[in-house]
């Protein structure tokens, strides 16, 4: 691997429970995370850092112990942000000290990675507080390199999915007002949407990443779980500002092993859903 390239591995939305056997929508979330980490092991060995972009637990702070155990031995910095299912103070408390970093920013070979907390307590929809927007502005203004990547949990753009677009980033306009002031921003990555997604806005790549557990059916009017297996994203950041990115999925055999061969696709009223 060229020393001038920065490689990040993004894993998101593991939704861990205090019970290590806990399941979400038919998927044992800890086993799925462990299988995903095993599938990504070669990329993790050569990356500069791992990104964990929220919903680390499923409303149970006991799940943080499992997250810490799963990630502490990777030998890489683990850059973390909370999602709507996380308890942000409990997450920060549970993931104190190396290799974990919660929020803030990190610099790698001319790239600044900015970690934003878009979670709002007890709400599925996200928002960036004035303090987070100010921190973003300052991090971009003071970045020593020429390029920046932003990570947050909630999607700041529409997904063409009626139910999902009600629980995105509520103040996306304010977010993009900051982004537009800083031409060094090359990309934005997020979790929350449980699917692979890509678009471009004013030359900035915007990337959504599938969960390490169950996926949401894209472009669905109402909430529906897809049959796709757990996945993760690898980002390669070049010194020219280019972002090369691929989503990798567990095999069908691995998915069937996790779910016992049972399909996980179901339909549920959005009124009963908290993503």
Image (cartoon, helix red, strand yellow):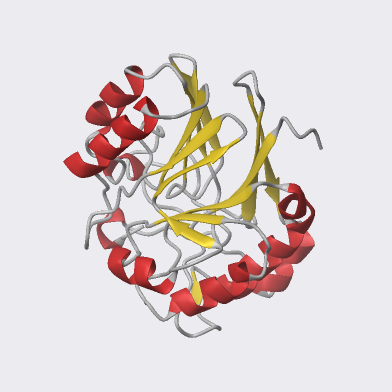
For residue 48, above or below residue 62: above
Q: Which residue is drawn at 30% across and 47% down?
A: 118
In this view, the residue farthest toward the left is: 130
* Whether residue 32 is visible: no
- Residue 81 against residue 221 in the figure, above or below: below
**Can residue 145 be seen here?**
yes
The relative height of residue 14 versus residue 60 in the rendered view (above or below) is above
Tell me which corner region of the image, top left, top right, bottom left or bottom right, holds residue 201. top left
- In which image quadrant can residue 272 be found? bottom left
Q: Where is residue 207 in the image (x, y as percent from the top left)?
A: 52, 34
Residue at 79% in and 33% down: 2
- Location of residue 59 in the rendering, given as x and y in whole percent from the top left corner: 34, 72
Give whichever of 110, 213 is nearer the camera. Answer: 110
Q: On the rendered structure, is 5 left or right of 104? A: right
- Quarter of the view holding residue 136: top left
Front-lying residue, 145 or 90 = 145
Q: Where is residue 222 in the image (x, y as percent from the top left)?
A: 36, 48
Tell whether 270 sits left or right of 78: left
Residue 213 appears left or right of 75: left
Seen at 68% across and 64% down, the residue is 74
């Amino acid at each position: 691997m060229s020393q001038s390239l920065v490689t990040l591995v993004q894993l998101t939305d593991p939704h861990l429970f205090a019970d290590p056997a806990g399941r979400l929508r038919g998927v044992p979330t800890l086993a799925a995370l462990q299988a995903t980490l095993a599938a990504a092991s070669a990329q993790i060995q050569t990356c500069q850092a791992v990104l964990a972009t929220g919903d680390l637990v499923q409303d149970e702070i006991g799940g943080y112990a499992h997250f810490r155990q799963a990630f502490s031995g990777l030998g890489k910095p683990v850059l973390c942000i909370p999602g709507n299912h996380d308890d942000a103070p409990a997450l920060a408390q549970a993931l104190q000290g190396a290799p974990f970093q919660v929020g803030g920013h990190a610099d790698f070979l001319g790239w600044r990675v900015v970690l934003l907390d878009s979670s709002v307590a007890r709400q599925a929809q996200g928002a960036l507080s004035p303090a987070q927007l100010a921190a973003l502005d300052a991090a971009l203004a003071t970045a020593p390199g020429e390029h920046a990547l932003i990570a947050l949990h909630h999607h700041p753009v529409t997904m063409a999915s009626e139910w999902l677009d009600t629980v995105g980033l509520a103040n996306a306009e304010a977010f993009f007002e900051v982004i537009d002031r800083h031409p060094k921003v090359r990309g934005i990555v997020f979790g929350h949407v449980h699917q692979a997604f890509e678009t471009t806005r004013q030359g900035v790549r915007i990337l959504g990443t599938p969960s390490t557990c169950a996926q949401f059916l894209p472009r669905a009017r109402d909430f529906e779980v897809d049959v796709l297996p757990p996945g993760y994203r690898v980002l390669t950041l070049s010194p020219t500002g280019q972002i090369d990115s691929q989503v990798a999925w567990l095999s069908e055999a691995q998915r069937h092993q996790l779910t016992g061969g049972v399909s996980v696709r179901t339909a549920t009223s959005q009124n009963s859903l908290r993503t």
